[in-house]
């Protein structure tokens, strides 16, 4: 699981909480860093997924291949992105639940 802070109205995201399993799987020290700062190979895909949820205010479930920075293998993940709001209107955070499928 991950908790991301929406920055710049969805132009970037900061990883505030990241589960150890994800850190171990993908080999990235996410915490307190932004998506832009980390510079994932899938940066644009991740940005689009998160922006879809921020704009719609609705949860998104998807399955796709994602590369592990640790050993550069592709894994299939199921991802649920849930919008959270501090004021009940604007999406301020995203709760992301991710699990490997294969």
Image: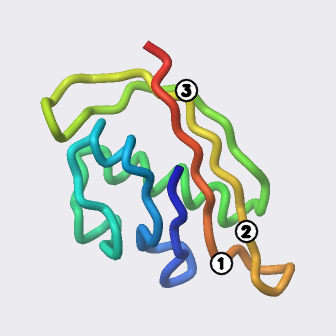
Question: How many discs mark residues in the rendered view?
Answer: 3
Residue 49 place in picture, x, y as percent: 54, 49
In the image, residue 96 sits, relative to residue 87, either above or below, namely above
Residue 17 place in picture, x, y as percent: 47, 65
Residue that numbered label 3 is attached to: 63
In the image, residue 10 sits, relative to residue 95, either above or below, namely below
Residue that numbered label 2 is attached to: 84
Residue that numbered label 1 is attached to: 92
Q: CA distance from mark 1 to mark 2?
A: 6 Å
Q: Residues within 10 Å of mark 3 (few under 14, many from 20)?
A: some
Between residues 22 and 61, which one lies in front from this camera angle?
22
Q: CA distance from mark 2 to mark 3?
A: 21 Å
Q: Do callouts 1 and 2 mark residues in contact (Cβ within 8 Å)?
A: yes
Q: CA distance from mark 3 to mark 1?
A: 24 Å
Q: Residues within 10 Å of mark 2 (few under 14, many from 20)?
A: many
Residue drawn at 53 percent across, 49 percent down:
1
Where is residue 94, by image quadrant?
A: bottom right
């Amino acid at each position: 699981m991950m908790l991301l802070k929406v920055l710049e109205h969805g132009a970037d995201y900061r990883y505030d909480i990241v589960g150890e399993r994800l850190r171990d799987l993908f080999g990235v020290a996410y915490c307190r860093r932004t998506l832009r700062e980390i510079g994932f190979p899938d940066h644009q895909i991740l940005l689009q997924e998160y922006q879809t949820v921020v704009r719609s205010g609705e949860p998104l479930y998807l399955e796709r291949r994602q590369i592990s920075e640790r050993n550069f293998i592709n894994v299939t993940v199921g991802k649920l992105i849930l919008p959270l709001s501090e004021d009940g209107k604007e999406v301020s955070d995203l709760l992301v639940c991710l699990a490997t499928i294969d």
